Amino acid sequence: MSKVIVVTSGKGGVGKTTSSAAISAGLAMRGHKTVVIDFDVGLRNLDMIMGCERRVVFDFINVIQGDAKLKQALIKDRRLENLFVLPTSQTRDKDALTKEGVKAVLDELREEFDYIICDSPAGIERGAHLAMYYADEAVVVTNPEVSSVRDSDRVLGLLNSKTFHAEKGEGAVKSQLLLTRFDPQRSASGEMMSVEDVLEILAIPLLGIIPESTTVLKASNEGTPVSLDEKSPAGKAYIDAVGRLVGEQIEMRVNPAERRGFLQRLLGRTA
Amino acid sequence: MFGFSFRPRKNGSAQTAKERLQILLAHERAGGTSPDFLPTLQREILEVVRRHMEIDGDAVDVKLERGAELSSLEINIELPSGSKPAAQKSN
């Protein structure tokens, strides 16, 4: 059975597109047939992060408006057999995205794909609303920073009330927290909220902790999903998060360099 | 719990961030978002007071302070030095 998962946050710039790309690539690496859809009409960016920007011909809006077949708009990833990208439109106005249109496309995708990842735009307007509307699950991307946590809380409220499942009384969309740009050292020194602080406030299960890492910018520069860089701390963290997303029990861990640094500080403090 | 996130040191600002969020979100979750009834409240108070006294249109000041334990609604009505009862009340 296929699953529609929205990657959302409210606040912009916290890592929704990076996470959508990394999660969808991670799912495909595990053999699941996966498609990732860009819902940010007018500000197309998922194509760049996925490295397929030069192969975009038709887009999501073309499909909704009947100007192109879904098969024509789907871009097959060159690295991963099971991965496809559905880019968004860059020019047309946001009203082109309709509830009926989104439903029709998702229904057609459900017939063929195991996972459908919806990369939400920032904000809580039309695009963000429609990205979450038909979701079965949600990944709420949050930075350990006050405005991001506040916006995530707002988005969680919408996930619990303004989605198809919620409106039908079929219960809330299962929402999990993906804490990104986390810096263990700054958190340990009290400069940054801890994982527990954010969990206590938002009160949802933790899907993963993505450490602040230079490899994220490198991956975006190169158009490679971070999870394909299995050596980087962020790549590993995304791979673990994907494992949890498909139901595996994986211990929350930090990369060795950061753990050693912490122990040193701990020893320094107690001595 | 995760090996790297013991209670932050007291001098850090993370604790402040957490406390501010806890207070704010408790209010936002309970009553929607911002108290958008405040402008209406201010206008209505002004109307009521004006039935009895002559005051300026900007004499009523409404402030809301949201705290962890309790919130306070502060209403300040500024009266001009020579304020007198409104005409229809001076019979």
Image: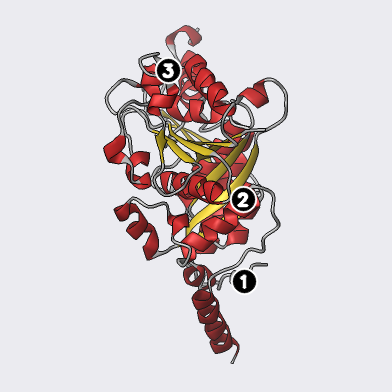
In the picture, the disc for residue A201 is: 2
| Image quadrant occupied by the N terminus of chain A | top right
Residue A209 % position (x, y): 55, 59
Label 3 amino acid? Ile
Report the front residue among B72 and A247. A247
Q: Say whether marks 1 and 3 touch (CB < 8 Å).
A: no
- Decide: few, some or many residues near mark 3? Use Cα within 10 Å; few <14, some 14-19, many ≥20: many
In the picture, the disc for residue B6 is: 1
Mark closer to the observer (1, 3): 3
Label 2 amino acid? Ile
Q: Describe residue B70's horizontal placement relative to residue A17 as left or right.
A: right
SS for callout 2: helix
SS for callout 1: loop
Tell me which chain the residue with mark 1 is part of: B
Find residue A221 and report its image quarter. bottom left
- Decide: few, some or many residues near mark 2? Use Cα within 10 Å; few <14, some 14-19, many ≥20: some
Residue B81 % position (x, y): 37, 31
Q: Describe residue A3's horizontal placement relative to residue A118 as left or right.
A: right
Lower position in the chain sequence, tag 3 or tag 2: 3
Q: Describe residue A213's horizontal placement relative to residue A42 as left or right.
A: right
Find residue A84 and report its image quarter. top left
Using the rendered image of the protein, determine whether residue A113 is visible from the camera's viewpoint: yes
Disc tally is 3
In the picture, the disc for residue A64 is: 3
Q: For the residues tagged 1 and 3, is the chain the same? A: no
Tell me which chain the residue with mark 3 is part of: A
Mark closer to the observer (3, 2): 3
Residue A216 % position (x, y): 39, 58
Using the rendered image of the protein, determine whether residue B66 is visible from the camera's viewpoint: no
Disc 1 to disc 3, how far (Cα)?
50 Å
